[in-house]
């Protein structure tokens, strides 16, 4: 997929979000990366193999997670 150098991280790498944008549709809430990952506005992801990555926004300063 990736034709530039250095190549983008593969879709199964932890830094997959660092890949170059191929398509960006903020009005629809998604972007496509050159490694085939679909990024969604809520920080969720859909990987090329169909695996779903749940939204993973960092917590704001002072925000806590309920146990």
Image (spheres, rainbow, N blue to C red):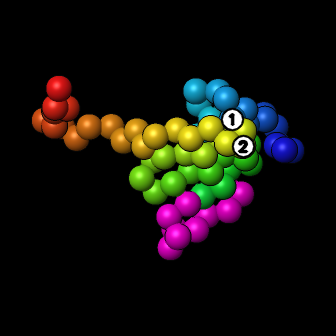
Q: Position of residue 21 (x, y in %)?
A: 66, 54
Q: CA distance from mark 1 to mark 2?
A: 7 Å
Say what secondary structure mark 2 lies in.
loop
**Left or right of 17: which side holds 61?**
left
Q: Quadrant of residue 63?
A: top left
Q: Within 10 angstroms of label 2, few (less than 14), some, or many (20 or more) residues?
A: few
Residue 47 seen anywhere in this rendered image of the structure: yes
**Left or right of 20: which side holds 60?**
left
> Going 50% across and 73% down the picture, which residue do you hit?
27
Question: Which label number is shown at residue 11?
Answer: 1
Q: Quadrant of residue 3?
A: top right
> Going 72% across and 43% down the picture, which residue do you hit?
48
**Left or right of 14: which side holds 37?**
right
Q: Position of residue 13 (x, y in %)?
A: 64, 27
Circles 1 and 2: CB distance less than 8 Å?
A: yes
Range covered by the magenta-colored residues: 21-30
29 relative to 32, above or below: below
47 relative to 38, above or below: above
The residue closer to the viewer here, 12 or 52, is: 52
Q: Which residue is mark 2?
A: 48
**Magenta span main SS:** strand
**Left or right of 59: which side holds 22?**
right
> Which is in the foreground here, disc 1 or disc 2?
2
Question: Which label number is shown at residue 37?
Answer: none
């Amino acid at each position: 997929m990736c034709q530039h150098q250095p190549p983008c991280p593969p879709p199964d790498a932890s830094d997959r979000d660092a890949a170059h944008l191929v398509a960006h549709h903020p009005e629809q809430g998604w972007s496509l990366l050159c490694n085939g990952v679909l990024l969604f506005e809520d920080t969720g992801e859909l990987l090329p193999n169909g695996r779903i990555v749940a939204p993973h926004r960092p917590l704001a300063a002072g925000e806590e997670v309920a146990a």
